[in-house]
Image (spheres, rainbow, N blue to C red):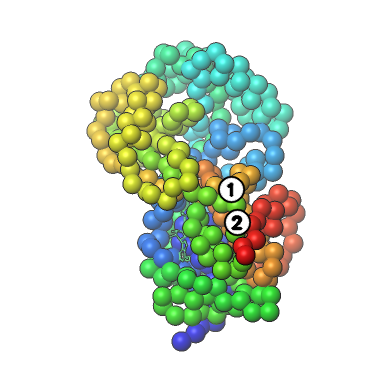
Amino acid sequence: MSYVYDAIIVGGGVIGGSIAYNLSKRGGKILLLEKDRLASKSSGAAAGMLGVQAEMDAEGSLFQLARKSREMFPKLAGEIRETSGIDIELINKGMLKVAINEQQQQEYKRLIAIQRQSGEQSDWLTGEEVRRKEPALTDAIKGAIHFANDGQVEATQLTLGFLNSAAACGVVIKEFVEVFDLQLSKGKVIGVVTNEGYFASENVIVAGGAWSNKLLSKTGLELDIYPVKGECFSVVTQSQLLTTTVFSPSCYLVPKKGGRIIVGATVKPRTFNHKVTVEGISLLLEQAKKLMPSIIEAEWERTWAGIRPQTGDGLPYLGEHPVYKGLFIATGHFRNGILLSPITGEIIADMVEGKPTSLNLKPFRVGRLIKQLT
Ligand code: FAD
Ligand code: GLY
């Protein structure tokens, strides 16, 4: 049996979710297919940092896109709460990028100057000021940049918030439905083949994260995309040990509701193996102890891992397939898919609608880094 939809989204992570949410606000019959559970892959593993300034250089197209996306969160949080009842737990307490040696201090002071030039708030705190703000941090910290505008959300809640809001506006969402093939005809996409049969649409959006190439290779092209595993653990403390997210090159500490702290993350390229290793977690714990010695008194909660989608040039793919009309791609958000999800959803919904954009999306076009398969 075949059904006709105005658009079909492949992938029930934060990117597919945001696209579904944005398309749902514009009307039409939309279908989202997820081969596993919703939010079960990278999006459910993320720490939820909105680290525009902590994670990125202050220049370049991705930084500009990320700034716009970060600005969208306060309104989005209200909309999602209203439509789905889900609290995305947006916290705007800033982030501290801590320096533990002289070299980092110099480097971070340069970064402050660059970020201020691009209009971002970025302030240097001495070691004493850092500890006054966050007494649980070690006195080995020489100083830190305080990014007042880099907040955080609860990543699974955000993903489910997008998806539940989309469903409330009529999007049909199916879990455990894998898209095996794309149906292509005369230079355009016309549908998808799944374990639940064929679904027809002249607009298909591939938001399959690190698994996107498995499907796209059916079009004779492959993206320059590869998996990067990240492991995390969480602890719970009786009283709140930390209020601000702490970011360092070796690990980060993200304080959540109810005394929970997420500690992340390892970076292991080119593996789809999502098992948590003793090596990964013990390395993270060592680093976390160096930043906040009293973490050893906390109660252990759990460990997990996720697979980030990374690209050859570090930029996501956002756009239409270079050969097949109506086939859109939104993947490769690597470490910042949670942060970039609101703007990605809006961009792709505009493309599907054929609406012009004022953004410069050239750096993200799909045709820039592709491999022709023989
Ligand atoms: P995914 O969440 O992986 O979703 C893709 C979905 O598509 C999957 O559910 C998959 O099952 C489905 N799928 C694939 N192929 C098919 C198919 N053929 N048919 C049906 N379904 C299919 N980002 C931030 O912004 N801030 C952070 O603090 C942060 N922390 C992170 C920490 C860790 C440990 C990790 C691993 C990532 C982190 N990230 C963070 C990155 C962020 O999680 C990713 O960039 C983002 O989740 C990618 O979203 P996605 O929807 O593209 O991919
Ligand atoms: N952005 C944090 C991570 O990917 O680990």
- Find out whether the residues at labels 1 and 2 contact each other: C-beta distance under 8 Å: yes
Image point (42%, 37%), residue name:
266
Give the residue furthest to the front: 374
Please give the label number shown on residue 85.
none
**Where, quadrant-wise, is the C terminus in this rendering?**
bottom right
Image point (43%, 44%), residue name:
229
What residue does disc 2 label? 223
Q: Is residue 117 left or right of residue 184?
A: right
Please state the horizontal and vertical placement of residue 58, each as a whole percent of the image: 66, 33
Q: Is residue 323 above or below residue 291?
A: below
Between 361 and 160, the one lying in front of the other is 361
Q: Is residue 21 left or right of residue 284?
A: right
Please state the horizontal and vertical placement of residue 68, each as a whole percent of the image: 64, 46
User: Label 1: few (<14), some or many (≥20) within 10 Å?
Assistant: many
Q: Earlier in the sequence, mark 1 or mark 2?
A: 2
Mark 1 lies on a secondary structure that is strand
User: Label 2: few (<14), some or many (≥20) within 10 Å?
Assistant: many
| Amino acid carrying mark 2 in the image | Leu
Between 81 and 231, the one lying in front of the other is 231
Please state the horizontal and vertical placement of residue 15, each as a whole percent of the image: 52, 56
What residue does disc 1 label? 311
Q: CA gap, disc 1 to disc 2?
A: 8 Å
Label 2 near ligand 1 (CB < 8 Å): no
Q: Is residue 193 visible?
A: yes
Please state the horizontal and vertical placement of residue 355, each as a whole percent of the image: 72, 65
Mark 2 lies on a secondary structure that is strand
| Amino acid carrying mark 1 in the image | Thr
Give the residue furthest to the bottom: 1
Image point (61%, 62%), residue name:
373
- Which picture quadrant has residue 200? bottom right
Image point (55%, 13%), residue name:
102
Q: Is residue 68 visible?
A: no
